[in-house]
Image (cartoon, rainbow, N blue to C red):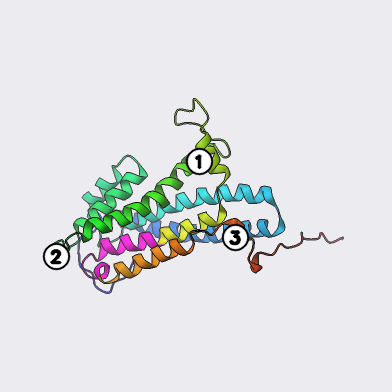
Amino acid sequence: MVLTGVVEQKNMPDANTHKHYEAYVKNVQDFLIAEKELKRTINRALKTGKNQTFEIQTKLYALLYSTFSESRFMKVILTPYGFEQFEVDEILKQSSIIEKWLKCLELAFRKFNQTKKGSEIPNKKLELSRIIKTYVLNPSILRNKIAHGQLTVALNSKNTSLNATITNEIQTLDFVEISKWFVINKSLCDIIEELIESPNKGHFRNYYTRFQQLESYILKTKNWTTETKMKTNKMRKLPPKKIKNK
């Protein structure tokens, strides 16, 4: 939950769903632990030249990201003193994950005081929608393929022919790019969560700073890849571990 110091609303999802919110808080925490551990494993594989381990773990890292993203999203929409239950229900009835995110954004901005904002709301919605489509929708497509058994070679939606485009995207997944997805997703969710919880105080006070920091990070890391990471001093290759004779 993003703390703003002032609770502006007294509405919240049905009391029975609070335990679901607490469950997602725990799930998100454990996803972040898993992300840290898997990232350490991948870095080790890179340093020791274990290419097959690196490639497999990178695909699992992409799968972990999208499942983390879904869990983080559920935590956002179930946040106490945010959406009312009918709004949560409206979000969850959408047919795809991207439609759920966009519906969440639409309902969040309904809470925003529109009297003096002019084009501010459309501009903010456009900015956040663009980031959602890039860093939630596109990875979710790869996640669905991998989760349905297409770890290396992808098929079309009807499983009647090969999908060369998505196959190439799976096979060229970049470890550093995925690690950036985690950072961007966390910042994005913080922005939306604050909009839901404190639309006219915390959000109004912090949005531009938070958004500029996110945009700055995206721009700064635009050319970061596994290849550029390997050129840094901290990624000097390590010799393979020697097996001690007993």
Image quarter where the C terminus lies is bottom right
> What is the residue that sits farthest to the top in this orientation?
160
- Compared with residue 229, is residue 157 higher up or lower down, i.e. above or below? above
Callouts 3 and 1 close, C-beta under 8 Å: no
Of tags 3 and 2, the one toward the viewer is 3
Circle 2 crowding by C-alpha within 10 Å: few under 14, some 14–19, many from 20 = few
Is 194 magenta? The answer is: yes
* Callout 3 amino acid: Thr
- Compared with residue 141, is residue 232 higher up or lower down, i.e. above or below? below
Q: Residue at point 30% right, 70% down? A: 206
Find numbered disc 1 in the image and state the secondary structure of the residue it sits on: helix
Whole-percent x and y of residue 110? 19, 56
Find numbered disc 3 in the image and state the secondary structure of the residue it sits on: helix
Please give the label number shown on residue 147: 1
Q: Is residue 120 left or right of residue 161?
A: left
Circle 1 crowding by C-alpha within 10 Å: few under 14, some 14–19, many from 20 = few
- Compared with residue 245, is residue 52 higher up or lower down, i.e. above or below? above
Whole-percent x and y of residue 111? 19, 59
Between the residue at mark 1 and the residue at mark 2, the CA separation in whole angstroms equals 46 Å
Q: Is residue 223 left or right of residue 236?
A: left
Q: Residue at point 30% right, 45% down? A: 92
* Callout 1 amino acid: Ala
Q: Find disc 3 in the rendering and name its residue.
A: 228
Along the line of sight, which residue is nearer the eye, 55 or 60?
Answer: 55
Whole-percent x and y of residue 163? 51, 33
Of tags 3 and 1, the one toward the viewer is 3
Find numbered disc 2 in the image and state the secondary structure of the residue it sits on: loop
Magenta region, residue range: 187-204
Between the residue at mark 3 and the residue at mark 2, the CA separation in whole angstroms equals 46 Å
Mark sitting earlier along the chain (1/2): 2
